[in-house]
Each structure stands twice: as structure tokens, then as C-alpha cells.
Image (cartoon, helix red, strand yellow):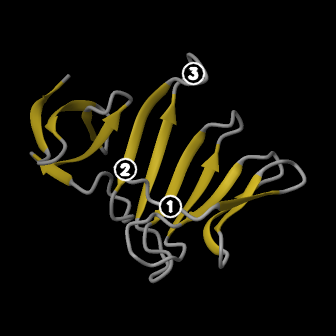
Amino acid sequence: MPVRFQPPLEYVHDAWNRLVSITRQPGSVLRGSYEYNGLNWRTLRRYDSGATQATAVDDERIYYYSAAWQVLEEHVDEDFGTSAGTDRIVQQVWGVRYIDDAVLRRLDRNADGDGIGCTKAIKGVKIMVLVDARGMPVAVDTASAIPVKASSCKVCLISSSPG
């Protein structure tokens, strides 16, 4: 199997040894850039996802952290180069038992604030479908925050009995 030649990459670090940019040589085509806050946490990542033939940065991710350095929210713009604006928002809820106690991951696929892209009303109760730490769908009554069973996040089938 022939090996395809890839032009070399140039990695640029700042004075604190944090990666700030990646360029492909020759021609210095920008493949990625990164920004950090005063605590050395990466707050912005822009990169070429490779999804299109264009050689420009087309994906942007903005990170928001807790005081314990846990990512709480991520704003994703997958078509940054052509159409600026948030495409989806990912939120992470952390427990108190340990530093990596991920309790819930909320994905808002269209960044309109209604959860995972499907909110249902069953018997007059508005229910939001979320994903737990194992990736399993969990429906939550938006008024009382009482979890109810969810069968499939893809089709948003939700049982009527809590628990």
C-alpha cells in the first residue's frame, strides 16, 4: 500500500508552552488556532475539520468552565468560515462525589434552548429529553424536574409513568 505524502505541520507555542496554532507547510495554511484564559484553560478552538475541501478554518468551539476546571458548556459553530453563529450547545452537569463524576450531558442540536432537539408534551406536561453520563436518554419534566423513563432519544418515545 503506497504511503501518501503529507506536507509537514508547524506547531507554534506561546511563552507558557501552550499550543496556539498549527499551520501546514508550504504556504502556511492555518489548520488550527487556540486561545486560553489567565488560568491556562483553553477557551477557544478554531480548526479545519476536514469535512470540506476548503483549506480554511471552518469549526469553532468556545468553552466555559467551572472553578474546578470542569467544562460546563461548549458552543459549537461547525460552519464558522461561511456562516458565523452557534450551531449547537453542549452542557455538562457534574456531581459532587468526585472530580470526574459526570451526571448529565445536555445536547441542544439547534441552539434554540429546548434540549436535545425534541421536547414533547405528554398529558399537558412538557418533557425535555437529556442524556445521562452513560449516554442513555433520560426525560425530565421541565416544571418539576422529575425524571421519567425515555426509550429512544432518536424518536423521543417517553413513558407516561415516572421512575
Front in this rendered view, residue 56 or 159:
56
> Could you give the CA–CA distance between mark 3 and mark 1, rounded to whole angstroms?
49 Å
Of the image marks 3 and 1, the number of the one nearer the N terminus:
1
- Residue 29 x %, y %: 62, 75
Q: Mark 1 points at which residue?
A: 5
> Could you give the CA–CA distance between mark 2 and mark 1, rounded to whole angstroms?
38 Å
**Farthest residue toward the top?**
97
| Tag 3–tag 1 contact (CB < 8 Å) | no
Residue at figure coordinates x 43%, y 65% from the top left:
50
**Residue at disc 1, secondary structure:** loop
Q: Name the residue under label 3.
A: 96
Residue 82: image quadrant is bottom left
- Residue 149 x %, y %: 18, 30
Relative horizontal placement of residue 10, taking residue 55 as reference (left or right): right
What kind of residue is marked 1? Phe
**Farthest residue toward the right?**
15
What kind of residue is marked 2? Leu
Decide: few, some or many residues near mark 3? Use Cα within 10 Å; few <14, some 14-19, many ≥20: few
User: Which mark's residue is nearer the viewer, 3 or 2?
Assistant: 2
Q: Name the residue under label 2.
A: 107
**Farthest residue toward the bottom?**
82
Residue at figure coordinates x 69%, y 51% from the top left:
42
Instruction: Establish if 91 lies above or below 54.
Output: above
Relative horizontal placement of residue 90, taking residue 116 as reference (left or right): right
- Residue 139 x %, y %: 24, 38
Residue 51: image quadrant is bottom left
What kind of residue is marked 3? Val
